[in-house]
Image (tube, rainbow, N blue to C red):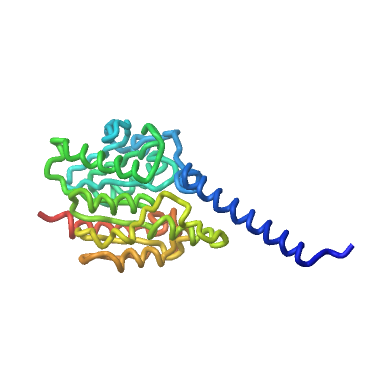
Amino acid sequence: MRANPRRLLAVVLRDAVFVVAVLISTGIVLRATDVIDHSFIFFPDRDVFNTPADVGLSYEDVDFQAADGTKLHGWLVPSDGDVTLVWFHGNAGNISHRVANLAALRARIGATIFIFNYRGYGRSEGSPSEDGTYLDAESALDYLASRADLEGSKTVLFGRSLGAAVAAEMAIRRPARALVLESGFTSIPDMARRHYPFLPGIGKLTATKYDTLSKIGRVEIPTMVLHGDRDEIASFEMGRQLYEAANDPKRFYTIPGAGHNETYEVGDALYYDALAGFIDEFAGGD
């Protein structure tokens, strides 16, 4: 029996409309329930498997509280210097995954370092979200400002990957001497379009934005951008875009041969020299 062309076309159109409707409704559901945000952005780990003591560092366990009551945890690694580097980590693991890097930074930079877990990471309570990370970061900075032993300390905001977005936001909200963005990205929608080009409109489905590119022009403190030229997650071009949009004074440092998660290892001495030089220039003086 020969198929009726008009009926066949009607069936195809009906099925196409159904598929589109499912995709649209699925997108609405995903947006409403933050499924995309929690499945593709935040990868927290609760297991704190080592501490700064394991790499020979003296440190203080710090428990503090966000403005909404969420209990948070971090480490303060002291120094004799007058600079405090506040470290905003990336989207995966927790602060115990940064211990080796923490030791290298403390040795090469010579600053007091405060690193803490966002809500949902390590020993910090709650569940992560963009607004939550901002609340946590504000509370971390407020906690440090309340300590008499750190009075007069010069604050440097240091953010890596997702933490670069948090650090940039804090540079707008709280006083600091300098801002360092390492392996940062322009925004989450840009990242979604980069990694899922086969899903048109994917960038619109996430409630999480971390739109650093639109904010960096509001930062009024010296800014340094460091980026590996082989970054497979947040492209090198994204780092350049952030740098171009930043206000003077600013610095850009290319880490030759470095991917997203190996900047400090591949960059080695030259990387630390560049970072230390920037901090000394803009936060080390009176």
Residue at 38 percent across and 40 percent down: it is: 95
Would residue 68 be visible to someone looking at this image? yes
- Toward the viewer: 4 or 82? 4
Residue 28, x across and y down, in percent: 50, 48
Residue at 60 percent across and 56 percent down: it is: 20
Name of the residue lying farthest toward the right? 1
Residue at 21 percent across and 66 percent down: it is: 248
Residue 253, x across and y down, in percent: 32, 65
Residue 189 falls in image quadrant: bottom left
Residue 125, x across and y down, in percent: 37, 32
Residue 254, x across and y down, in percent: 36, 65
The answer to whether 182 appears left or right of 35 in the picture is left
The answer to whether 18 appears left or right of 254 in the picture is right
- Toward the viewer: 240 or 60? 240
Q: Image quadrant for the C terminus?
A: bottom left
Residue 7 falls in image quadrant: bottom right
The answer to whether 30 appears left or right of 48 in the picture is right
